[in-house]
Image: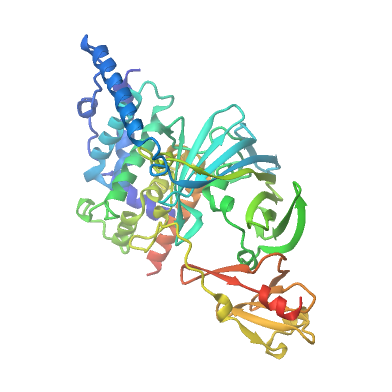
Amino acid sequence: MNDHFRRVYVELLDRTPEPPTWSDVAATRVVPAHHSTRSGPLVAITAGVGVVVLIGVVAGLFQGASTFFAPPTVDYVRIAWSQAVEPRCLGMDVRDTGGFDSATIEVWGPNADGRYRADITAPDGSVERVVADVGVEGDTRRAWATYPMIGGEALFEEATAFRSVECVTSDGRTSYGVTDSPYVPTHIPGLAFMSPRVGASLSSGNESVTEVRSDEWRGNDVVVYVTRDTSAMEVGDRDLGLERWVDPATDLLQRMVFAVDVESLGHFETVSEVVDRQSVQVDDDHFSVEGLVASFDRSEMVEAGEAVTTTSIVPTAHPLMTDAVEVEPDDIANPDLHGVIDPREGDRLLSVPLSETTALLVRLRPGARPHMYATSCGLLTSVDLPDGWDGTCTELVREGSLEVGRFGYAAAVSALGG
Amino acid sequence: MTDAEIYESLRWDLMRYATALVGPDDAADMVSSAVTKVLDAKGGLTPLRDARPYLMRAVLNEVRMRYRTRSRRPMVPMASLPEGAHEPGHDHMIDLVDRLPPRQRAATYLVYYREYTPTEAAQLMGCRPATVRRYLSLARDKLREALDE
């Protein structure tokens, strides 16, 4: 397969033209005028006075009209991030860059263009910034393009200050990342601003929600989701855990613990904790990417001509509940699923079709929590639906577009006296 | 070393890279624009700690900016390719490489032609090794699909 590429490049490079000479390049360069003249300082002082006067006039004119010129309001979140890594790298070499294991991440957004900015401040005070355009196919949790910079200058790379660990095979040709990057929360900034969706975890193959519970954290009642993924990888079994603490009053993320253990690579854990959340006013310049080049650009991942959108608009919610049909216990053809659901007198069963072979089944039982069963031919997983919410969001990708629905079970529970 | 000496030592390497990315017709333009921008931004090549990867990234960025503004038109006109390359499926391959986005093209050039490891290619492209592997995978998938057609 690789020889095909090689042959094309061999032929292409046979035609490599003569490169431009140094004098060609230097001749096209715009040389800045650094020569000072006698009049220079005077011009500068004069211009400075002019600016001061102009600002004074403008301020005087618009004093008291600040609301008219008020910058737009965006959400602001400050996150304490830390990581811990124990590399094993069985039969491989460890490549450890060193660097910091913690950071303060501040995120602003989205602005009117669906853009987020994240400043990642290392313990030594150095700041790396990522501006992210988000929203592919309407999904605000995915970055369309990211623009990293440090000290206001475009960066080619990310995470320069933070520790990164890889396991490298002895021939040096293959490497496996053990750590993640503090940029991850900013690549998917929606996580800081949006509520996790149960349905997404329920219907995503190996990953499953194994626990949803109410708990207390920092004196607040929160809903904790624990998801597990124990799928096997080529490097050995992988045990992945994601714990998300959500404030039920706002549905917003408070704390996230991501832990992954891969047999041959090692253990990695990262904690992102929201320590401040508010609305702030910032100028649109705050999100400027002028002079920067996207370091990650999803447009390079799609085929030419493929329809894509960069809007950050969450698609209109599809009322999946209206698609739900009430089914009878006998309608559950799969005996295993029937056994798991264990329908009893007084139960109501609702089926929300997702595709021809996939459905969500929800059991409403008097005196018990609504319980959701995700199926794909057979049972994938099931979970108690959390208290305190009017409903649960479900989502699926149908023909390439994300559909978001809301399963409003509160009224049904109320009708059952639950 | 002076700026001129640094450039002289790298210009063929940069030119081959640019040719692999955009074809022979536009390669000189890409190299010239990229180097000029670096000179303007940094005041010369001598302040660069390691000029080669920096300039290679600059060339790739120049290509990417051009690619975006040209709304993905083919970057290597067929007319500029050598004659006689007509083994079965060969035109198809050229077409395929022609349509690859710049970074997939850069990854396939650096790894499959120059035989860099994904980690080394990542340093030259300014991204992570995992990202290079993803670009390679995407490019291979496209090739596989093309060969199946």
Q: Is residue B20 visible?
A: no
Please report the residue visible at 59 percent of the width from the left and 32 percent of the height from the top. Answer: A122
When asked about the image quadrant of residue A335, the answer is bottom right
Q: Nearer the viewer, residue B40 or A286?
A: A286
When asked about the image quadrant of residue B79, the answer is bottom left
Residue B2, horizontal then vertical, whole percent = 32, 18
Please report the residue visible at 40 percent of the width from the left and 38 percent of the height from the top. Answer: A64
Query: With respect to residue A15, does A363 lie above or below?
Result: below
Q: Quadrant of the N terminus of chain A?
A: bottom left
Q: How is the image coloured?
A: rainbow
Q: Is residue B139 left or right of residue B15?
A: right
Please report the residue visible at 41 percent of the width from the left and 57 percent of the height from the top. Answer: A311
Q: Nearer the viewer, residue B4 or A129?
A: A129
Query: With respect to residue A388, does A158 lie above or below?
Result: above
Q: Nearer the viewer, residue B83 or B76?
A: B76
Q: Is residue A263 left or right of residue B40?
A: right
